[in-house]
């Protein structure tokens, strides 16, 4: 089966009013296999949302794009408006962090889901409604009928996100891009959303590009993980390997920032949480060195001389770090 | 030592009315009692809608409870007039989730910090300058930010500024309502350490602020607080020393919050701390 999407050496820079360039995404290459969940982890400014938007050719007007996003061997950035519209929502769809703002406030949610079908297919209204009902049934079970007739404000955050997901998958896309869909939800609701996405992956062979700033969320969920820092993918590999044996110094440092629950024998929890020293780099400057070097505990001379390429770090894992160059 | 802030059988109901339906009431906080000792580190943990933010608003005297008592230094605040509450409120400071919305966008960092000193303490320019330098140092912000506006700051810097502003009036109680949730993990760790510095144990209990950390992140709560209070459906369902609750969670709501947040044992080799 063909890959639903391939990102080739994609770079996006934003041209600001002040005449500067912000290099949001640099030479990102990714492949998403059918029915695969790829977790993309990064902090603010790492380029993960720019990557998400690029997958639907939705970069803002001030974005300058190099490279390609290939869907069935066609570069999305080369397509015309009409062709793109046909792809967005039907082949590739998108959900965001804040489902409340993605929904129309004065339209019943059932009708909003139906609208997507109307835009992408020619089936009758009755057929559309029954399709939306059966989809809501599979997501909400017994309360589906009540949800169908509800307005967004009558639903909880978790329910709204499920509606956004229903909207995104009603046309049976092969890829769902999820940009921090659980960031505004509490940990219990978060897991319910993840379970729903996992179910969709299995039942529909849906590929998911799941963007998050939380590595631990991907545990038991993602098949592969890409870690981003300062606009580049710095580590890419099997989820299990990345989570249990992170190789890139940034991934290791990021994991260390996340405290383990304090259930230990020590009576005092005064010990400080490990932090990453320093600040993320200024993305308006072109780097000819490793962007993480100034904060890296394993910094070497070569790190300041050129940008590290990918080196194999184990079976099906690689990292942009000179530590693995030999 | 007497509690600095306490609640007894606190109830907060909100009336709600849907179109074409009868008026109903939602009990956001239901019979909650708790006591915060001076200098304590307490966390209230719960899923969305459990009533933790409403409880915080009642404790901070921003909302009047439907029934029950909130005591600040022994005084029943629910019986006080608005004028008297204005004297108490500055001593209980809040820091919220989104620091970008907490500031007037046209204020500089200096304006943000100056306002409470002008309104509450009537400090002159020289005294304010001195206080600003001190409080910025306390939260780890450079003084060259004083003339900047909130939008020029990073998310972490903005949250540090919110904490500096909360510290400006030497409060007895600091309430952090999901103050870390919107931040990156590396920044969360920095701010969490700042909270631990603020409630430094080497400082005498009576002179350091008590910290009430409200969150759905039980892991982070367990690192910051000595005592955990778990809320579910408006009620306290479990409370006690952090270690006991984390290692032997009794209530299903606590177990649900804990599940999925723990790294697997295989990750125990987490490399050297950096």
Image (spheres, helix red, strand yellow):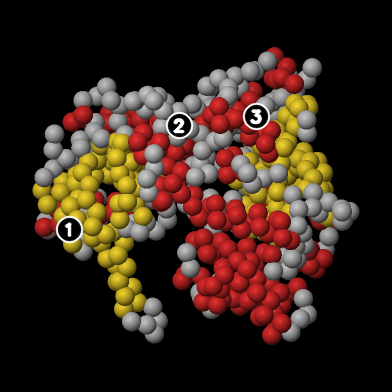
Secondary structure beneath dot 2 equals helix
Q: Which residue is mark 2?
A: B190
Q: Residue A206 bears which disc, if any?
A: none
Image-quadrant location for residue B125: top left
Relative placement, left or right, of B68 versus B27 is left
Q: Position of residue A249 (x, y in %)?
A: 63, 25
Labels 3 and 1 in the same subunit: no
Crowd rating for badge 1 (residues with CA inside 10 Å; few <14, some 14–19, many 20+): some
Q: CA distance from mark 2 to mark 1?
A: 37 Å
Query: What residue is rendered at 63% in x and 31% in y?
Result: A244
Pick the front one: A313 or B106: A313
Q: Are marks 3 and 2 in contact (CB under 8 Å)?
A: no
Q: Which residue is mark 3?
A: A246
Q: Which residue is mark 1?
A: B68
Query: What residue is rendered at 60% in x and 45% in y?
Result: A212
* Chain at tag 3: A
In the depicted structure, whether residue A141 falls above or below residue B81: below
Q: Are marks 3 and 1 in contact (CB under 8 Å)?
A: no
Crowd rating for badge 3 (residues with CA inside 10 Å; few <14, some 14–19, many 20+): many
Crowd rating for badge 2 (residues with CA inside 10 Å; few <14, some 14–19, many 20+): many
Q: Can I make out residue B148 in this image?
A: no
């Amino acid at each position: 089966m063909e890959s639903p999407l391939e990102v080739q050496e994609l770079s996006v820079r934003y041209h600001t009013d002040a005449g500067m360039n912000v290099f949001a995404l640099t030479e990102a290459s990714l492949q998403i296999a059918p029915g695969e969940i790829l977790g993309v982890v990064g902090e603010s400014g790492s380029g993960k949302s720019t990557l998400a938007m690029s997958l639907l050719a939705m970069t803002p007007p001030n974005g300058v794009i190099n490279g390609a996003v290939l869907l069935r061997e066609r570069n999305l950035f080369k397509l015309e408006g009409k062709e793109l519209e046909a792809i967005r929502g039907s082949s590739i769809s998108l959900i965001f962090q804040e489902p409340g703002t993605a929904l129309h406030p004065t339209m019943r949610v059932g009708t909003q889901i139906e609208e997507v079908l109307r835009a992408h297919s020619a089936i009758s209204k009755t057929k559309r409604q029954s399709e939306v009902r059966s989809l809501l049934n599979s997501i909400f079970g017994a309360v589906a009928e009540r949800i169908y007739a509800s307005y967004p404000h009558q639903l909880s955050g978790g329910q709204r996100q499920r509606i956004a997901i229903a909207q995104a998958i009603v046309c049976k896309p092969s890829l769902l891009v999820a940009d921090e869909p659980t960031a505004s939800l509490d940990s219990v609701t978060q897991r319910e959303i993840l379970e729903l996405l996992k179910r969709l992956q299995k039942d529909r062979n849906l590929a998911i590009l799941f963007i998050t700033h939380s590595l631990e969320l991907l545990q038991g969920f993602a098949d592969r993980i890409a870690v981003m820092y300062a606009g580049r993918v710095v580590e890419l590999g099997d989820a299990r390997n990345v989570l249990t044996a992170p190789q890139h110094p940034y991934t290791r440092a990021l994991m260390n920032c996340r405290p383990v629950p304090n259930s230990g024998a020590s009576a005092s929890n005064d010990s400080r949480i490990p932090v990453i020293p320093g600040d993320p780099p200024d993305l308006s400057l072109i780097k000819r060195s490793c962007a993480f070097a100034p904060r890296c505990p394993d910094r070497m001379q070569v790190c300041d001389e050129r940008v590290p390429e990918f080196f194999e770090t184990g079976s099906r894992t690689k990292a942009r770090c000179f530590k693995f160059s030999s | 030592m007497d509690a600095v802030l306490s609640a007894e059988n606190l109830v907060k109901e909100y009336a709600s009315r849907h179109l074409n339906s009868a008026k109903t009431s939602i009990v956001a906080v239901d019979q909650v009692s708790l006591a915060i000792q001076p200098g304590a580190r307490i966390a209230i943990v719960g899923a969305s809608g459990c009533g933790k933010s409403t409880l915080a608003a009642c404790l901070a005297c921003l909302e009047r409870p439907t029934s029950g008592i909130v005591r600040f230094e022994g005084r029943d605040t629910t019986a006080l007039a608005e004028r008297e509450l204005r004297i108490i409120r500055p001593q209980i400071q809040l820091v919220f989730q989104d620091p970008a919305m907490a500031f007037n966008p046209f204020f500089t960092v200096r304006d943000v910090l100056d306002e409470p000193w002008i309104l509450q303490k009537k400090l002159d320019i020289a005294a304010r300058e001195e206080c600003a330098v001190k409080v910025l140092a306390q939260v780890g912000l450079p003084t060259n930010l004083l003339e900047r506006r909130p939008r020029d700051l990073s998310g972490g810097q903005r949250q540090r500024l919110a904490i500096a502003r909360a510290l400006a009036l030497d409060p007895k109680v600091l309430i952090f309502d999901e103050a870390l949730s919107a931040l990156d993990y590396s920044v969360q760790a920095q701010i969490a350490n700042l909270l631990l510095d603020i409630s430094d144990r080497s400082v005498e209990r009576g002179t350091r602020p008590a910290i009430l950390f409200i969150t759905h992140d039980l892991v982070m709560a367990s690192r910051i607080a000595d005592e955990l209070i778990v809320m579910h459906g408006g009620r306290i369902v479990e409370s006690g020393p952090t270690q006991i609750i984390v290692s032997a969670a009794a209530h299903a709501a606590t177990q649900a919050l804990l599940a999925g947040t723990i790294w697997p044992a295989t990750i125990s080799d987490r490399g050297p701390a950096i």
